[in-house]
Structure formats: structure tokens, C-alpha cells
Amino acid sequence: MTSTEDSEILKTLFQYQNGFLISKIMFTAAELGVFDLLRESEEPLTAEAIAEGLGTSHIGMQRLLEACVGLKLLRMEMRDNKGFYGNTALADLYLAKSSPKSQYSDMKFDSELYYPSFQYLADAVRSEEGIQLYFGALKNSWILYCREMISEFDLSQFHHICDLGGGSGIFAEEHILSYPNSSVTIFDLPEVVEKAKKNFVALEESQISFQGGDFFKDSVPEADLYILSRILHLWDDEKCMQLLTKLYKACKPGGGVLVIEPVLDEERVKYFGAHFASIKLLVHTDGKTRTPSEHKALLTAAGFKEIQAKHGSVYGALLGRK
Ligand SMILES: C[S@@+](CC[C@H](N)C(=O)[O-])C[C@H]1O[C@@H](n2cnc3c(N)ncnc32)[C@H](O)[C@@H]1O
């Protein structure tokens, strides 16, 4: 490799390594209004005047302006030993909010919505690891509460169970340990089922089976009891009704549905676990945590009867019959 090739490679490396800083410097200067102030002033301004005009610290603004000069977003001329800053054509045309060709809204969207989520790009690419981590997280909490939830009701009359959105299968495993004559089909998204299968090398195939599919779009396996564990809180009432109605139709008379959820109390004051879940759901999904009567209303509207509700130390359980 010649020394010219080597320095080209190093330049590229430097640019790629610092690319995120370039975007953020440009977003920040635009957001603070640097390009607008300079566009409106029609004459170059000192760092002090810009900091004062925008209500920022002098030192911070000075550094931001110098970086913008390095990126050719601003130009600087020295007068009487003082730097005076003005917009370059690029900033004046595209970065100032008041320019008719301004790209500010698009940039603000990138800065506020996409920039933070790119923190998780590696997780998204590393999905194998992501699913394992997800299974691990689900498993951790069920190690503590699964047995308690399974023993809330006598489920011995149900022989074949379908665990919808059964994930890693830990719930199915516990169910079989508590009811050794039962069998469970774990129904989950195909990519999740593929991973979950590997966890079950030790269990009898006749007792545990897997089916990949989407419970909103595909038909669900036949079963005496459908388990919906930590599923309904992920969706709004309309989606929950869609799923529960489908299960009611799939159920034989005498069959049922078991819902396990972080359930609120009727006054919505107890059970911090359900409140924490609710806050997380606000950020990530259309779902919500519900009170026992909100759950009962959904189950009843779908057709289920004889609904019983119980609450364990953290999770709540409701059993409905057809
Ligand atoms: C919060 S986890 C609950 C897992 C498990 N039931 C438990 O309690 O540990 C939600 C599960 O629903 C599955 N899921 C989400 N949407 C689904 C869909 N449309 N069809 C089938 N499974 C789905 C996810 O893959 C995930 O395993």
C-alpha cells in the first residue's frame, strides 16, 4: 500500500468514525437557532452576541460555532482580533428555519426520532442474541411467579392446552410439571418458535409441540384451554376483542381461556408491578394494563362465561369458560 492510499484510508476511517458527531453538530446548531439568527441579522456576529441572542453559555456556543466552521456550515472572519460568524450558502438555504427551502423539520424528525433509536442498531442486527436475552428476561420472572399462577385454578379438567404467544415455553413446561397428563402446544411467531424448540430437547415430544403462526391472522390449534399469558396488555381493546372472539369460536363447549397479566386493582392504587408495566407500555405499544372488571368486560363481550378472577403476589389470572 502506498502512503497516499494509506492516508486516503485513514481519512475515510476518520470520517466514518466521527460521522455521528457531524450530524449531531448540525442538528444542534439548527435546533438552537444559530442559522436563523445569522440569517436575520444580515451581518456577521461574534460568538458572544450569538450566545446572548440565543440564551446559551458563551463557551459552549464558541465551541459549537468553531465546529460548524470546520464543517463549512458557517464561515468566520477575524476583525480586531475577534471572530465574526456568518452562514455559508448551505446553512442559509437549507438549515435556517425561515428559508423557503429549509430542511429543518426533516432534520428535527431524524434528530429526535431516529438518532436515539440508532443506539439499538447493534441489538436489532444481533437478533439471535436479542431473542435469547428476551427469553431470558421472560424466564427470569416466571421462575418466581409461574407456579403460583398455574395453581390459582384447578386446571385438571383441561387435557390439551394451547399457550398462545408461549415464547420460550417456560409456562408450558411448568404446566406439564403440575399436570403430568396434559399436553401443550406452544403457538408463537415462526422465528420465536424456531428458537424455543431448541430449549425443549429434554421434554417428551408427545407432551409438547410447537406451531408457528400469527394469532391475529392464522387459525389457532385445537385445544381444551387457551392460555394468554402476558399477551393482552400488549394490545388495545379492539385487538384484544379480535383475539378473544377468535378463541371463543375455536373453543369447544366446556373449554376455556386463561388470561395471566399484570392486573391492576379496581381502585388502580395497588400493585406497582402493573403500574410499571403500564408506563413501559406507554412508550412501546398500543397496550395497557387493565383492572379485573375491564378484563371481565372483554371476556364477556367475546362470549366467555363463569369468569373467575384471582390475584397473586404480582400477576393476576382470569379463567373464562365457553
Ligand atoms: C410478552 S411475551 C409473553 C410470552 C409468554 N407468554 C410469557 O408469559 O412469558 C409476548 C409473546 O407473544 C408473541 N407474539 C406477539 N405477537 C404475536 C402474534 N401476532 N402471533 C403469535 N405470537 C405473537 C411474542 O413473540 C412473545 O413471545
Image (cartoon, rainbow, N blue to C red):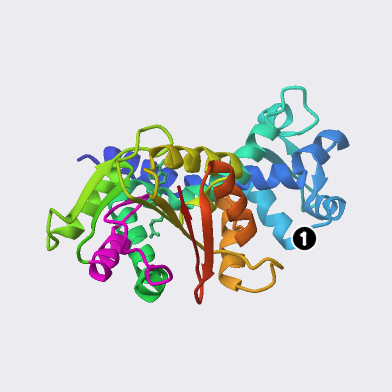
Neighbor class of circle 1 (other Cα within 10 Å; few <14, some 14-19, many 20+) is some
What amino acid type should be assigned to the residue bearing mark 1?
His
Q: Is residue 282 visible?
A: no
Q: Quadrant of residue 266?
A: bottom right
Q: Read off the residue under disc 1.
A: 58
Q: In this view, which residue lies farthest toward the front?
A: 253
Which residue shows up at 36% across the image and 33% down it?
218
Q: Position of residue 66 (x, y in %)?
A: 65, 50
- Residue 102 on the magenta span: no
Label 1 secondary element: helix
Q: Position of residue 162 (x, y in %)?
A: 32, 50
Which residue shows up at 71% across the image and 55% down it?
62
Please determine whether, in this image, residue 5 is positioned above or below residue 100.
Answer: below
Direction from residue 295 to residue 225 in the image, left or right = left
Direction from residue 273 to residue 105 in the image, left or right = right
Q: Position of residue 17 (x, y in %)?
A: 42, 49
Which residue shows up at 24% across the image and 64% down it?
176
In front here: 292 or 137?
A: 292
In front here: 227 or 280?
A: 227
Q: Position of residue 54 (x, y in %)?
A: 83, 51
Please determine whether, in this image, residue 179 is positioned above or below residue 168.
Answer: below
- Residue 163 on the magenta span: yes
Which residue shows up at 78% across the image and 52% down it?
47
In front here: 308 or 190?
A: 308
Direction from residue 307 to residue 57 in the image, left or right = right
Q: Is residue 252 visible?
A: yes
Direction from residue 143 to residue 279 in the image, left or right = right
The magenta segment: 150-179
Please determine whether, in this image, residue 132 is positioned above or below residue 312.
Answer: above
Question: How many numbered badges does the structure rendering display?
Answer: 1
